[in-house]
Amino acid sequence: MPDVDRGEYRGLEFSIYAGAFVLGIAVSALGAILPALFPAIGFQKADAGGLFLAMNFAMLLGSVFFGPVCDRFGFRILLLFSMLTLSGAYALLAGAASYRAVLTAILVLGFGGGGLNGAINALLNDISPNGRQRALNLLGLYFGCGALFTPFLIGSLLDSFGLRSILLGLMLLSLGPFLFFLLARFPAPKHQGGFSGSEMRALFRNPLLFLFGLLLFFQSGNEFTISGWISTYLGESIRMSPRNAAYALTGYWTAFMLGRLAASRWAEKLSSSTLVMCSAGLGCVSIVGLILVRGRIAAPLFVVLTGLGLAAIFPTILAEAGSMFAKYSGTAFGAIFVMALCGGMSAPWLVGRIAQQHGVGTGLWIPAGGCVAIAILQAIIRLRSRA
């Protein structure tokens, strides 16, 4: 890809960060609205589990399709489609009167979110050739702000305005990045003349692509597992009240976002491999400490340290992959995101199966082992990159 003048795409960069904020809202929306949906629609908790599975599966499908579309036709069409899809999903949710209608809306939300997630990461990678680590860590920060915004919004406005009005508000909010993307200047598509079959085969035969994907398989599994199970663990093993466990989880997310902010500032001072391996080491030590140390003061501290440890890994690996596969960044990111989502779906499920028999603390050895796998895979990637 030719050299990019980032000043030419300042408006586009702002649009991407706005899209990341809206994506964070979309990803966290289901969990935030579930308590209000139960009495409104009248379905069971087991059905809610099906909604989460459906959303993740739809995000996986969106991740499959976005890459070739963006590489062939550019990013504008896909991003506009994704924003309209998210907006339409909120409209469907606002009008849903049955479980089937909610399920349809969640599938639409997940598909649009999967396409948006892949496209904003790949596009920011393309327009930030000399600062990928910093830019992608900042992108994760805006995503985290959106994810934190949703429960606060719903919690503070639900009694006053009702769920339907909030969902319609989210529908309108999603149209903001749509207008930004409509007006922004985009780089030209990288493969307007079509794909070279030999180059595509070479891409998918490159073991580094799958090493990156496997590393993010473990990282995504770690993130989903810790965020999904940590409150339950603190209540079960540390005997913390639900309120204090929620505060600890807030501390985790706050540390996670601050870690990405710090990584964006240190990106130029540390090699990506050093940053990933140190982060994985801190994550592993923190999770093991959380499992072994049962104090009510120490446990929240280890939760916060876990957030700091996990924060920088995902965007830093994307920056590595984006630099290596710049010519087909969309397609490469699509393959990597598919593998990552598989980890995000399977690891929490596996921890749940273990927790059923042996407790959540035993299940947390899964993300601890995942951190070890991340460090090993990063070492292999570094060796193969230098070969």
Image (tube, grey):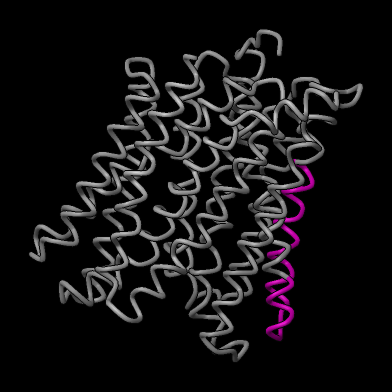
Residue 176, relative to residue 344: is it above or below? above
**Does 231 sit left or right of 195 as displayed?**
left
The range drawn in magenta is 79-104
The kind of secondary structure the magenta stretch mainly shows is helix
What residue sits 32% from the left and 44% below the top? 372
Q: Is residue 264 magenta?
A: no
Location of residue 118 in the rendering, given as x and y in whole percent from the top left corner? 64, 41
Residue sitting nearer the eye, 140 or 177: 140
Placement of the N terminus among the 4 image quadrants: top right
Farthest right residue? 193
Is 60 on the left or on the right of 156, as rendered?
right
**On the rendered structure, is 41 left or right of 252?**
right
Q: Position of residue 343 (x, y in %)?
A: 51, 54
Q: Residue at x 43, y 46 (%)?
A: 219
Q: Check if residue 102 falls in the magenta segment.
A: yes
Residue shown at 57% from the left, 70% from the top? 52
Residue 178 percent coordinates (x, y): 72, 43
Q: Position of residue 337 (x, y in %)?
A: 60, 44
Query: Is 281 displayed left or right of 63 in the figure?
Result: left
Residue 41 occupies quadrant = bottom right
Q: How many numbered marks have been drawn onto this rendered protein structure?
A: 0
The residue at the point 71 percent across, 20 percent down is: 327
> Based on the displayed image, in which of its 4 quarters is residue 377 positioned?
top left
Q: Nearer the viewer, residue 97 or 230?
A: 230
